[in-house]
Image (tube, grey):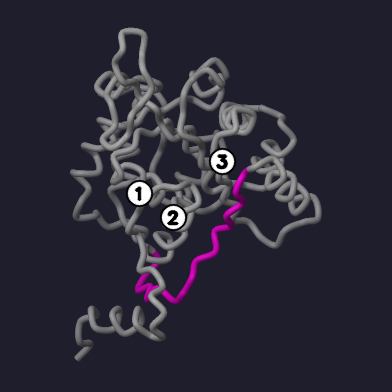
Amino acid sequence: MPTGGTNATAATAGIAGTAGIAGTAGEAVRVPWIVGVSGASGTPYAASVLRGLLAAQLPVDLVLSRAARLTLLDETGIGWRDAAWLDPLSIWLGRRADGTRRRDADEVRARIERLVEVHPPADLGARPSSGSYPTRGMIVVPASTASLAGVALGLSKDLLQRAADVTLKEGRRLVVVPREMPYTRATLRHMLDLDAAGAVVAAASPGFYAGARDVDDLADFVAGRVLDAAGVSNDLFRRWTGTLGEARSAAAGSQPDPT
């Protein structure tokens, strides 16, 4: 079973459709997306982003802050342990927002086993803490106002903040997804500072034109737009085609007859 910071099958595997980076022996090495999950409410957004990355066959380095573990427990009932993360992560990503099991749960678990590594938030010596560790970029979802401030100010108080700071200094893509609102003047200034530093601030604001039928559809809309901002192809939501009412009609047509 995989444990924190290790994944033997994915450590040196090349990713389909990606040239990779040459290793010491000439082999393609693993180049992941870093995903940081902070303590803000919004675990369905994080789960959908993670599933989207895995569906695209992209490796992931995952960091859950200490506060995120409390939020995960509160919103899903799932207890997290870095020393044995495979089961809780598989259960989390294998469930819908209402707690029922997804039809693709087994496939999701297989992707997790192959593509995911997990790093404890206190491990400031982990690979994502160094700019010499190649990554595609980082997504912080959801981003609490505290984590947003820490990244904007370059505090590097934990691995999540340090990895985001490294992502910025290396000129890689950083997408930060704040969910808390309303915003204080300080938080708005931190968002402006992140934008000026080259990050994308993508608020967790679901759109309603895509014919959402449930909470999962709303979470997938946000996750899809976050992945768009990261440059990751996805089909998590119905895109605008220019036809008024098309998505609403399609959603209504897929609903069972209440009679």
Q: Earlier in the sequence, mark 1 or mark 3?
A: 1
Q: Residues within 10 Å of mark 1 (few under 14, many from 20)?
A: many
Query: Residue 203: within the magenta?
Result: yes
- Amino acid type assigned to the residue bearing label 1 in the image: Gly
What is the secondary structure assignment of the residue under circle 2? helix
Cα–Cα span, label 1 and label 3: 17 Å
Disc 2 target residue: 223
Instruction: Identify the residue at horizontal 48%, vertical 46% (top origin).
Output: 230
Q: Which mark is residue 25?
A: none
Q: Earlier in the sequence, mark 3 or mark 2?
A: 3
What is the secondary structure assignment of the residue under circle 1? helix
Task: Indicate left or right for 50 with 141 as reference.
Answer: left
Task: State yes or no: discs 1 and 2 in contact (Cβ < 8 Å).
Answer: yes
Residue 87 vertical position relative to residue 41 in the rendered view, above or below: above
Task: State yes or no: discs 1 and 3 in contact (Cβ < 8 Å).
Answer: no
What is the secondary structure assignment of the residue under circle 3? strand
- Amino acid type assigned to the residue bearing label 2 in the image: Ala
Residue 235 position in % (x across, y down): 32, 58
Disc 3 target residue: 174
Query: Residue 74: within the magenta?
Result: no
Task: Indicate left or right for 136 with 67 as reference.
Answer: left
Residue 217 found in image quarter: bottom left
3 vs 2, front mark: 3
Instruction: Identify the residue at horizontal 71%, vertical 39% (top origin).
Output: 152
Disc 1 target residue: 52
1 vs 3, front mark: 3
- Amino acid type assigned to the residue bearing label 3 in the image: Leu
